[in-house]
Image (cartoon, rainbow, N blue to C red):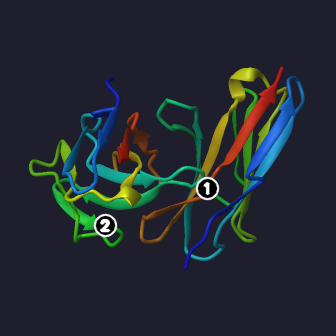
């Protein structure tokens, strides 16, 4: 079974530029999560999808961040424009269902904003 | 504000020694407690999902206990090996299904 796929693995951009991250979850997993992880901290949820519906986006900074999961499968997270403080690892995870089900993580995208 | 605390923040252990660390979480509206291991440059890997008070889970040399009434879980590693070096994350899941993550315990095994 293929795991969660994320691309790119690394991205370096200048501030004010746009950037997009892509995630393909494990086949059959209805729930998809985007997390942000800063050094020395635990993952912070940005958005959770149940199929194509964003059911929890309360932590997503909507002025510059957007996400979509149009067909309920793969998902894209976008930042426009990027700021210096957005430098972090962006993790995607998927699970069959929320709460008790194990989340399976992709390798993450390490974003550096210069 | 729901908070998940992990201690210690980092830990150096001699190869062969056993060790343990703690995850503290809210004792109300408990649904599940997750433990993950995250090695550098790899994806976080699920270790355990625990739902019942008093639950104990074991995977090889790693085991975990759960006390939902007082809001803590212990992770134990017996006979530490260099490959155990990683950050160990716990996450609390409440009735709203949202996972609240701790900052992790960074474990370094000294050969």
Can residue A92 be seen here? The reply is no
Height in image: A52 above or below B85?
A: below
Task: Mark 1 vs mark 2: tell me if same chain.
Answer: no
Question: Do tag 1 and tag 2 residues touch (Cβ < 8 Å)?
Answer: no
> In the figure, A35 relative to A112: above or below?
below
Q: Which is more toward the observer, A81 or A48?
A: A81
How far from the left and from the top, in percent, is residue B80? 81, 27
- Residue A31 image offset from top left, x and y in percent: 30, 51
Give neighbour class at mark 2: few <14, some 14-19, many 20+ (Cα, 10 Å).
some
Instruction: Name the chain letter of the residue that bears numbered label 2.
Output: A
Q: Quadrant of residue B16?
A: top right
Q: Which residue is mark 1?
A: B103
> Which quadrant of the figure contains the C terminus of chain B?
top right
Which residue corresponds to the image point at 69% horizontal and 22% vertical from the top-left?
Answer: B83
Q: Is residue B15 visible?
A: yes
**Residue B100 vs residue A81: left or right?**
right
**Secondary structure of residue under mark 2:** loop
- What residue is shown with label 2? A60
Crowd around label 1: few <14 · some 14–19 · many ≥20 (10 Å): many
| Residue farthest along the bottom direction in this orientation | B1
Label 1 element class? loop
Q: Is residue A89 left or right of residue B93?
A: left
* Left/right of residue A3 with respect to residue B54 in the rendered view: left
- What label does residue A75 carry, if any? none
In the picture, residue A99 is in which quadrant? bottom left
Mark 1 belongs to which subunit? B
Q: Where residue B59 appears, x then y in whole percent?
A: 67, 31
């Amino acid at each position: 079974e293929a795991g969660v796929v994320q691309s790119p693995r690394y991205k370096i951009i200048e501030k004010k530029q746009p950037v997009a991250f892509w995630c393909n979850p494990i086949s059959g997993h209805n729930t998809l999560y985007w997390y942000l992880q800063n050094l020395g901290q635990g993952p912070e949820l940005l958005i959770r999808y149940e199929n194509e519906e964003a059911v929890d986006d309360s932590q997503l900074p909507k002025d510059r961040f957007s996400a979509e999961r149009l067909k309920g499968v793969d998902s894209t997270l976008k930042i426009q424009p990027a700021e210096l403080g957005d430098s972090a690892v962006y993790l995607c995870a998927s699970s069959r269902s929320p709460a008790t089900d194990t989340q399976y993580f992709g390798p993450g995208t390490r974003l550096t904003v210069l | 504000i729901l908070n998940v605390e992990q201690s210690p923040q980092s830990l150096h252990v001699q190869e062969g020694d056993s060790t343990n660390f703690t995850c503290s979480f809210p004792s109300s509206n408990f649904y599940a407690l997750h433990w993950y291991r995250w090695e550098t440059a790899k994806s976080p890997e699920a270790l355990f999902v625990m739902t019942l008070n008093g639950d104990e889970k074991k995977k090889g040399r790693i085991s975990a206990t759960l006390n939902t009434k007082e809001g803590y879980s212990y992770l134990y590693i017996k006979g530490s090996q260099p490959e155990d070096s990683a950050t160990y994350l716990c996450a609390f899941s409440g009735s709203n299904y949202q996972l609240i993550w701790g900052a992790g315990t960074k474990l370094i095994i000294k050969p």
